[in-house]
Image (cartoon, rainbow, N blue to C red):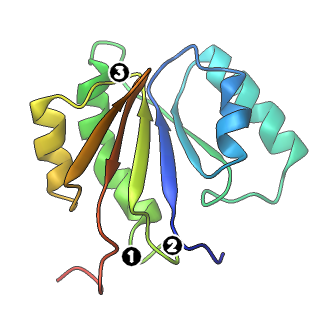
């Protein structure tokens, strides 16, 4: 994969469904498991069987008792592992989160991964960081 910048869409809305395909056309999507989201993801996988996590849709499970922000913070290490320095070239430098807000706790949690710029969107937020110069120490 050869990209100048990698942005990961993180979908925490359980009813995002058909919009997953649109998101996947512009980059990788990491979406919460739900009947609606998984059905659309399965259609995508059937249509594009050779897509990997770097250019397709990944579904992850989360407890329904957690808030979207808690789910994001709990899942972020896994997302970082899949799109970080050792897994993607180049590593991701942006996330577009759907279904959660960039609360103070979320900003603090993402800052541990180098994210230092945040902007609110209509249905969530985006976070940005500089491209890492080398592997984490």
92 vs 49: above or below: below
The residue lying at 29 percent from left, 53 percent from top is: 77
Q: Residue furthest bottom?
A: 134
Instruction: Please give the residue where the numbered disc 2 appears in the rendered image.
Output: 88
- Helix, strand or loop under label 2: loop
Name the residue carrying label 3. Answer: 63
Crowd class of label 1 (few under 14; some 14 to 19; many from 20; radius 10 Å): some
Between 113 and 50, the one nearer to me in the picture: 113
Specify few, some or many for label 2: CA neighbours under 10 Å numbering under 14, 14-19, or 20 or more.
some
* Residue denoted by label 1: 85
Locate residue 70, reporting x and y percent: 23, 28
Where 100 falls versus 25 (above or below)?
A: above
Marks 1 and 2: in contact by CB < 8 Å?
A: yes
Please indicate whether residue 82 sits to the left or right of residue 27 in the image: left
Q: Measure the alpha-carbon separation of dots 3 and 1.
A: 28 Å
Q: Nearer the viewer, mark 2 or mark 3?
A: 2
* Residue appearing at x 60%, y 73% in the figure: 3
Which sits earlier in the primary sequence, circle 2 or circle 3?
A: 3
Q: Is residue 2 above or below residue 33?
A: below
Q: Nearer the viewer, mark 3 or mark 1?
A: 1
- The image's mark for residue 98 is none
First in sequence, mark 3 or 1: give its number. 3
Residue 40 spot, x, y in % from top left: 74, 26
Task: Residue at 87% x, 41% y: name it.
Answer: 46
In the image, 38: left or right of 9? Answer: right
Exactly how many numbered labels are in the figure? 3
Quadrant of the snapshot with the C terminus = bottom left
């Amino acid at each position: 994969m050869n990209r100048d910048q990698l942005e990961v869409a993180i979908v925490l809305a359980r009813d995002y469904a058909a919009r997953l395909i649109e998101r996947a056309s512009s980059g990788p999507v990491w979406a919460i498991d739900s009947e609606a989201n998984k059905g659309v993801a399965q259609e995508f996988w059937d249509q594009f069987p050779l897509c990997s996590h770097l250019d397709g849709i990944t579904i992850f499970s989360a407890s329904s008792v957690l808030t979207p922000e808690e789910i994001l913070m709990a899942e972020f290490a896994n997302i970082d592992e899949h799109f970080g320095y050792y897994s993607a070239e180049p590593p991701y430098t942006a996330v577009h989160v759907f279904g959660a807000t960039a609360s103070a706790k979320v900003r603090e949690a993402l800052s541990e991964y180098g994210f230092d710029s945040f902007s609110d969107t209509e249905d969530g937020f985006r976070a940005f960081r500089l491209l890492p110069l080398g592997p984490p120490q």
